[in-house]
Every structure is written in C-alpha cells, then in structure tokens.
Amino acid sequence: AELIADVRDDLLPSGESDFELTNDVAVDLVIDADRDQFYRVIRNISRNAAEAGAWSLHVSVQWLGNGVHINMRDVGPGPAPRALENLF
C-alpha cells in the first residue's frame, strides 16, 4: 500500500490533476520484490493510463498463497483507433 501511495504522490503532487489513483492494497501486505523496479512498473503503468486520458486508476492486490495478483483497472476513453492497430 505504501508503494502505491508513493506513486500517487509522485504522479499527483498537491492534487494538480483530475486523475484519481485509488489504492485498494492492504497496508500489511508485503511483497518480496525489488522495490525500485516494482515502483517503476507501477508508476509507468499509472502514468501511461493518465497520459492516455484515463480519469481514474484502481489498484488492488490479491494474495494467492504462493504469489500475488495485481489488478490495475483504469476508466477512460481508451487508446485511439490508430494506436490500437499498432499495439500487437
């Protein structure tokens, strides 16, 4: 939860944006990962959503016993049709 809050604070200093990042991660959840690398992944996905015109991004994590499922779901217009042609 702390890492997601750090990403939110980095992307949205002083509430300068209409973009909303919702942190739905348990405060006591600990993931065994390189914090800097994990931060960059979460920040890049969050920034991409905001730059693509998303209004909000909801981040949640589900513990699966031997790993985690990270869900990042945005609400917005989605990619432009031309961008979709080049995604895959």
Image (cartoon, helix red, strand yellow):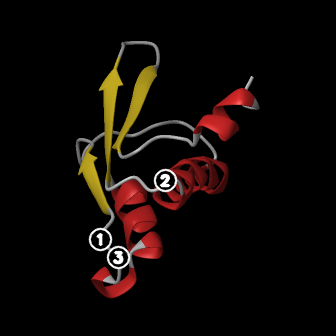
Say which residue label 2 marks.
46
Q: Verify CB contact (< 8 Å) between mark 3 and mark 2.
A: no
> Quick check: marks 1 and 3 in contact, CB under 8 Å?
yes
> Mark 2 or mark 1: which comes first in sequence?
1
Q: Position of residue 38 (x, y in %)?
A: 59, 47
Q: Nearer the viewer, mark 2 or mark 1?
A: 1
57 sits to left or right of 11: left
Lower position in the chain sequence, tag 3 or tag 2: 3
Q: Name the residue under label 1.
A: 18
Cα distance in 3D space between marks 2 and 1: 14 Å
Q: In which quarter of the image is the C terminus?
A: top right
Secondary structure of the residue carrying numbered label 1: loop
Measuring 64% from the left and 57% from the top, which residue is drawn there? Answer: 36
Secondary structure category for the residue under label 2: helix
| Residue at the farthest front position | 81
Q: In this view, does 37 lie to the left or right of 10?
A: right
Q: Residues within 10 Å of mark 2 (few under 14, many from 20)?
A: many
Provide residue 32's location: percent of width, then percent of height. 53, 36
Q: Is residue 72 above or below residue 27?
A: above
For disc 3, the marked residue is 17
Residue positioned 38% across, 73% down in the render: 9
Three-letter code, disc 3? Ser
Mark 1 packing: few (<14 Cα in 10 Å), some, or many (20+)? few
- From the viewer's side, name the closer residue of 12 and 5: 12
| Lateral position of residue 74 relative to residue 43, left or right | left
